[in-house]
Amino acid sequence: MDILGEVEDRRDAARTHVLKSGIAVTVDGTQREACVIDNLSETGALLFVEQPEQLPEDLVLVIDGESNKRPAHVVRRDKGAVAVSFVTKKTAETSDNGWVFPPDHNNG
């Protein structure tokens, strides 16, 4: 059982336990929240943060040791944890969240 409880697993990709540090940044870059990435996949991650309610619905995840910044959308919050789904060019095109990707962005 994970910290978010027993729920139906609707993930598109299996997640790997990683325990990496990172920063969740608001899309406009004005706010930052340190986090620990507990598990990670191509499609999402589970983050531990001090105040999950303070994170916006849309954010950018910066993982220590990686050059890629990962646009993400919060899908669940509970007990110091936040589950996020990574936003790809494909999913951004079908939503109205205003994501803009640079021409060399390789996500999705």
Image (cartoon, grey):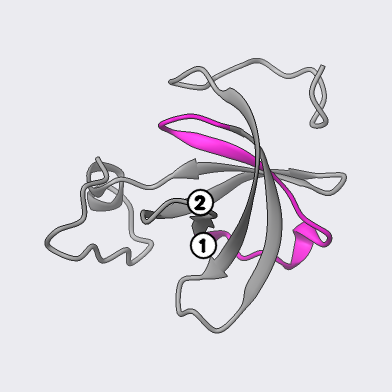
Residue beneath label 1, please?
Answer: 59
Query: Residue 53: within the magenta?
Result: yes
User: In the image, what residue occupies the spot 21% across and 48% down?
Assistant: 106
Position of residue 87 measured from the top left corner of the image (x, y, whole percent): 38, 47
Looking at the rendered structure, which numbered label has been put on residue 73? 2
Q: Relative to 24, say whether 75 is above or below.
A: above
Between residue 75 and residue 43, name the one nearer to us.
43
Say which residue appears at 79% left-offset and 24% top-offset.
2
Real-space Cα separation, disc 2 to disc 1, in angstroms: 6 Å
Q: Quadrant of the C terminus?
A: top left
Q: For residue 76, what is the image quadrant?
A: top right
Q: Residue furthest front?
A: 65
Which SS class for mark 1? strand
Q: Position of residue 9 (x, y in %)?
A: 61, 16
Question: Which of the 4 quarters of the picture holds residue 55?
Answer: bottom right
In percent of the image, x 68 and y 68: which residue is there?
A: 33
Indicate whether 64 appears above or below 45.
Answer: below
Q: Which residues are magenta?
A: 40-60
Please give the name of the residue rendered at 26% of the width and 66% of the height, measured from the top-left corner.
100
Q: Residue furthest left?
A: 103
59 with respect to 107 (left or right):
right
Is 83 covered by the magenta stretch? no
On screen, 28 above or below 63?
A: below
The three-letter code of the residue at mark 2 reads: His
Quadrant for the N terminus, please.
Answer: top right
Q: Mark 1 and mark 2 in contact (Cβ < 8 Å)?
A: yes
Q: How far from the left and from the top, in percent, is residue 102?
A: 19, 66
